[in-house]
Amino acid sequence: MTHAEISQPEAMRRDPRALALLLAASLTVMAAATISPALPGLARQFPDTPGNAFLIRLLVPAPSLAVVLTAALCGILADRLGRKPLLLGGVALFALAGSAGLVLADLPLLLASRLILGIALAMIMTAQSALIGDYYTGAALHALSGAQVAARNFGGFAFITLAGVLAGIAIRLPFAIYALPALALPFLARVLTEPARHVRPGDMGAVADDTPDWRLPVALLALGQCVVTMLFFTMPTQLPFYLQWRGYEAPGMTGSALGALMIAGGFAALLYPRIRRAIGDFGGWGLGFTLQATGFGLLISSGDAPRIFLGTALVGAGYALSMPGFIALSLSITPAQARATTAALLTGSVFLGQFLSPFTSIPAIRTWGWQASGTGLATGLGIAALISVIAALRRGRV
């Protein structure tokens, strides 16, 4: 326990540190998706060769790959050097590497800047997640975990919409959005405080010797978060092609559907604390997986626009209700000295799920087609929902 910990949501809402951490959380979607509207224009700026076409397509997932490779190191640095310096340094590097695309004329250099952007994001998200566990406990921890998911959804919607507008003015202009987080640096530096140290930097091997059973539950929660993220990310990676298969050629249809997904997810995440109080953690997972299974079922069952929008909204809402439990439970059972390690594991698991998603969904679609693949996805989530509900009933929380 530290003197800064807050356990009640009411006190959390009055804490400026909560706003600072939510601002940091909103950068998650910004890293990968902000340049998506500019990709066709960027492809036209470079010679049309197979090598360049491959590098162009790597620009979006490159930050996620860098996060997976460097999150563990960021966890060590956060424990040894401190959370606040890592977060502030990450935000500064994020703004510099992201906005470099405004001026970089060489495609390999542009890809390198995207990888550096991913390293910055790993620094930010690892430190931010660790600080959530340092500052908040109990109901406040769960409430902020839900608000974090909402911030990612609303932030992603705002950034992608703005990027689409800027790409219509000039192809490189969306890269300017990455400089915006630098404006928040003075606020972050002022309100964030470094938690009290519990062990010396050289003693990390002795962490939590008296609580040896926290590591396996945290590893299982991180694995669950990775799998759920991998399934969910079939939406941004495959939805455009699925809509094309259904006969919707206009990019506006994809943008509107993804907008419905993000908005629904944002509002659902805000309701997460109330839902958790009513039906518990397993009940929340059961509801989240049920909504996702229903959403994917609607998407695959019909090609009419209302069902498509309703399906994407249900998938977004279900994912938003599923994720906070993984985060809050992992941080709550981790000893204070090892929270940055858990935060790094959680950060890496999310981006590993994002990175692996196309490598699982594309072969499935090629082998079994849209209909069978979508039905299998909905069935798998339905089974996960049933298991969660059974667990909740055994705990007497439904």
Image (tube, rainbow, N blue to C red):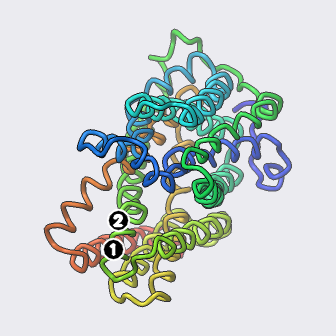
Question: Is 300 positioned to the left or the right of 259 in the image?
Answer: left
Q: Position of residue 171 (x, y in %)?
A: 54, 49
- Most foreground residue, 226 or 234: 234
Q: Are marks 1 and 2 in contact (CB under 8 Å)?
A: yes
Q: Position of residue 388 (x, y in %)?
A: 41, 68
Q: Quadrant of residue 197?
A: top right
- Most foreground residue, 76 or 150: 150
Q: Quadrant of residue 93?
A: top right
- As drawn, the label of residue 80 is none
* Numbered circles on residues, count: 2
- Quarter of the N terminus within the rendering: top right
Question: Is 100 positioned to the left or the right of 373 in the image?
Answer: right
Q: Position of residue 115 (x, y in %)?
A: 44, 32
The residue at the point 53 percent across, 42 percent down is 333
Above or below for 234 versus 134:
below
Q: Does any portion of residue 106 appear in the rendered image?
A: yes
- The CA span between labels 1 and 2 is 6 Å
- Specify few, some or many for label 2: CA neighbours under 10 Å numbering under 14, 14-19, or 20 or more: some
Outermost residue to the left? 367
Q: Secondary structure at mark 2?
A: helix
Q: Secondary structure at mark 1?
A: helix
Q: Does any portion of residue 152 appear in the rendered image?
A: no
- Identify residue type, mark 1: Tyr
Above or below for 204 versus 296:
above
Outermost residue to the right? 14
The residue at the point 44 percent across, 17 percent down is 205
Above or below for 270 versus 173:
below
Residue labelled with disc 1: 242
Residue labelled with disc 2: 238
- Identify residue type, mark 2: Gln
